[in-house]
Image (cartoon, rainbow, N blue to C red):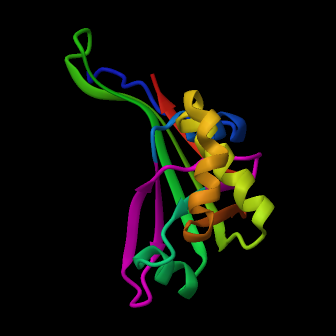
């Protein structure tokens, strides 16, 4: 008789959002103008239950993809631990993952752009917020900010 394997468990939308919040980076997948998939890891921050932001330069392949087709997929893993279960003599992996679909667009409003950059800095470098205003005055005009608005609730799975 084969040992029973612990099945993955579906997570709530709120639990899936927590995974995005904890993941060190989020992979954003999109479609190149040629139709070929393209994905890359980004430092993304969540504003609320449907809004995410990231920043980048004003040029690059991801911008070409977004201009052609603004639909994107986000995926994140906040915990991933290989394990060997001696009682079952089984190799497995314990994980928490989330996926979401959304629409990506460039932020044009100056105040929203600054707010998004503030959220990013608070998430990734909170100890250095005293330098935020100076950094904004030097680099805001050469920094692009994009908003991803989820088009359906995120989904998540875990196995622990």
Q: Position of residue 25 (x, y in %)?
A: 45, 45
Count of labels shown? 0
Residue displayed at 27% across by 24% down: 2
| Foreground pick, 152 / 137 | 137
Left or right relative to 18: residue 92: left
Q: Quadrant of residue 105?
A: bottom right
In the rendered image, residue 1 lying in the magenta stretch gets the answer no
* Residue at 77% from the left image edge and 46% from the top image edge: 48
Please tell me whether residue 42 belongs to the stretch shown in magenta.
yes
Quarter of image, res 68 = bottom right
Residue under the point 45% across and 22% down? 160
In the displayed structure image, the side of residue 35 where residue 92 appears, left or right = left
Location of residue 85 in the rendering, given as x and y in whole percent from the top left corner: 26, 15
In the image shown, does 39 or 87 lie closer to the viewer?
A: 39
The residue lying toward the viewer, choosing from 69 and 55, is 55
Q: Residue 124: horizontal and vertical position, in percent? A: 53, 37
Q: Position of residue 91 (x, y in %)?
A: 23, 26
Q: In the orientation shown, which residue stands out farthest toward the bottom?
A: 34
Magenta residues (range): 26-53
Which quarter of the image is occupied by the N terminus?
A: top left
Extreme residue toward the top, this view:
87
Question: Where 61 falls versus 46 (above or below)?
Answer: below
- Assign the magenta stretch its main secondary structure: strand
Instruction: Indicate the quadrant where residue 94 lies.
Output: top left
């Amino acid at each position: 008789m084969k040992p029973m394997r612990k099945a993955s468990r579906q997570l709530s939308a709120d639990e899936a959002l927590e995974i995005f919040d904890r993941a060190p980076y989020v992979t954003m997948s999109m479609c190149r103008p040629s139709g070929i998939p393209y994905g890359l890891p980004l430092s993304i921050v969540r504003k609320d239950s449907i809004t995410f932001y990231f920043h980048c330069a004003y040029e690059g392949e991801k911008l070409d993809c977004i201009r052609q087709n603004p639909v994107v997929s986000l995926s994140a893993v906040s915990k991933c631990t290989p394990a060997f279960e001696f009682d079952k003599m089984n190799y497995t992996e314990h994980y928490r993952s989330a996926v979401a679909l959304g629409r990506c667009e460039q932020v044009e409003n100056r105040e929203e752009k600054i707010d998004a950059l503030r959220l990013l800095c608070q998430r990734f470098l909170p100890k250095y917020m005293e330098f935020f205003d100076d950094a904004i005055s030097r680099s805001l005009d050469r920094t692009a900010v994009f908003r991803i608005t989820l088009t359906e609730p995120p989904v998540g799975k875990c196995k622990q």
